[in-house]
Amino acid sequence: MKNDRALLEKTGWNLDNSYAGLPKSFFTRLNPTPVSSPNLMILNHPLAKSLGLNVQALQSSEGVAVLAGNEIPEGALPLAQAYAGHQFGHFTILGDGRALLIGEQVTPSGKRFDIQLKGSGKTPYSRGGDGRAALGPMLREYIISEAMHALGIPTTRSLAVVTTGEFVFRENTKPGAILTRVAASHLRVGTFQYVSRWGSVEDLRTLADYTLQRHFPDVDNQNRYLFLLQEVCKRQAMLIAKWQLVGFIHGVMNTDNMAISGETIDYGPCAFMDTYDPATVFSSIDTHGRYAYGKQPDIAAWNLARFADTLLPLLHENQDQAIKLAQEELSNFDNLYHSHWLAGMRAKLGIIDEEAEDKFLIQDLLRMMQKYRADYTNTFRALTLDKPEEMVLYGTTEFAQWHEQWQARLGRQQEAKTSSHPLMKRSNPALIPRNHRVEEALSAAVDHGDYSMMKRLLDVLSNPYSYSPEQADYAAPPKPSVRPYRTFCGT
C-alpha cells in the first residue's frame, strides 16, 4: 500500500475547481459512493499522457481507486451539477443523477478539462435512480467517443472504464461500471435553462460570464452576451455539419445534451447510419422520429432557440429589443450550418472550388443513394478509391449520367484532378464504428470478459482515414436482417 500511495502522489493530478466557485445553487457537493471491488478494464494511454497523468500510477490499486471513486485525489472537490432540459420537447428539472465532477485537470500546456465519474452513485438529482451505470453502455461510450475523436469531430472523451464488483438492475442484472469522462466542460444548454428558471438575473449573468471566461475568452465587450450566443451557434453549426457528413445519429438531442463548448456529449442511443435514409432512427424511445438523422440540424436550431431564451435578460434591458437581437442571430444558424455542410460535401467529392450548381450535384447523388438503399460511408469510400463498381448505384443509367457530370465538374477546376484524391481521402473515412461491430465487441467484453475484440476495434478506428488493408473487414456493412437495429438509453 505504501508503494501504491507513492504512485498515487506521482499520478499527475493537477486539479482546480473553478465551477465550485459559482453560486451554491448550481450544484451539490458530495463524494462518490465507494464500490466493493474496482477493477480497471480499459485505460486510454494517449489521453492520459496528454492530460499530464502518469499511466503507470493510474493502473496501480490507488490509481484505480480514484477512477472508481473510492479515493479522492488531492485538490478534488467532487460535485453534482444541476441543470434542466427539454426532453423530447418537454421541459423538466434534471442534473447529474449518476455522475460527479471530480475537478478540472489543468494540463502541462495550461488547458483545462473536466474530469467526471459517470456511474459514481446517487445524487440529489437521481430522481429515484440508483446512480450507477452498467458496463455495456460505459464501454459503448468509450468506443464511440474515441471513434468520434479520431474522425475529427469535437467530442467528450473517455479516459477509463472500471468495473465495480457490483451489479445494477435494469431489465435484468448487469455488471456495474464507472466511466471517467473528459470534457472541455459540462456546461449545457440545460445548465442555462436551470439558472434561468430557478436563479436570479445576477445568477444568470454569473454563469454567462464564467462560460465566456472558460470557452470564449476573446469576448467582444460591445455586447458580450450576444457574442456568447453567436459563438455557441457557430460551434453547433460546425458540429452538426460534421455529424451529418459521417452519418452520425446522436439519438437523444435533448437540450441537456447540447454542450456549450461545441463538443458531442452523452452517448446513449447513438449509432452510425449504414443505408442512407434521412428518416433513420435507431433509438428505441424515439418513436416519432424527433431526432432522426435528417432532422438533427433543425433540432439543433430549436435547442439554440431555447438557449437564446435564457439569455434574453442579458441581451438588452428592453425585452422586445432582446428578442430581436436573438432572432437575428438565430436566423444565421441555418446559413452557417449549410455553409459547413456544403463545404464538407464538396470535399467528400473532391471539389476544391465553388460553383452554385454543386448543391444539385450533391442532392442528386443523395437522392440516388436513398432510392437504391446505398451504404452511406461505402458509397463515398468507393468514389474515393475510384471503384464505382463496388457501389449498388453502379450499372444504373442515373448513376452513369451523374458520374459523367461529376467528372466534368472536376475537370473545370483550376487544380489538377490529382488534387481531388487526397482531399477525398481526408474527407471520407474508410470505416466508421459499424453498429454490428460495436455490438460484437461489447458482447465479447460484457458476456465473456474478452476485451481483445474491443481493443482491436479501437485500434482500427483510431485512424479512420488511413485506408489501410486491415481496415477492409471492418468497412463491410452488416448482413441484411429483417429486424432493424435498435439502440437503447443505457444506464
Image: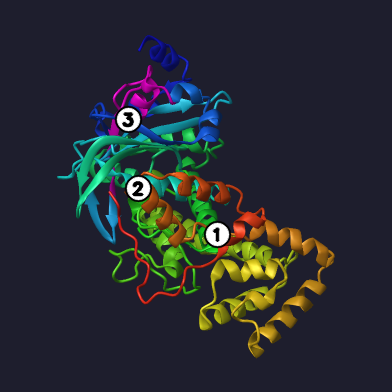
* Label 3 element class: helix
* Label 2 element class: helix
Q: Earlier in the sequence, mark 1 or mark 3?
A: 3
- Residue 94 visible in the snapshot: no
Residue 429 left/right relative to 125: right
Name the disc covering residue 448, or none.
2
* Label 1 element class: helix
- The amino acid type found where label 2 is placed reads His
Q: Is residue 66 above or below residue 165?
A: above
Observer-nearest of 132 and 115: 132
Q: Earlier in the sequence, mark 3 or mark 2?
A: 3
Residue placed under numbered mark 1 in the picture: 474
- Residue 329 visible in the snapshot: yes
At 48% from the left and 20% from the top, the residue drawn is: 12
Region rendered in magenta? 59-84
Observer-nearest of 443 and 396: 443
Residue placed under numbered mark 3 in the picture: 68
- Judged by depth in the image, the label closer to the viewer, 3 or 2, is 2
Residue 3 left/right relative to 339: left
Q: Earlier in the sequence, mark 2 or mark 1?
A: 2
Other-residue count near label 2 (Cα within 10 Å), few / some / many at <14 / 14–19 / ≥20: few
Report x, y in % for residue 289: 34, 70
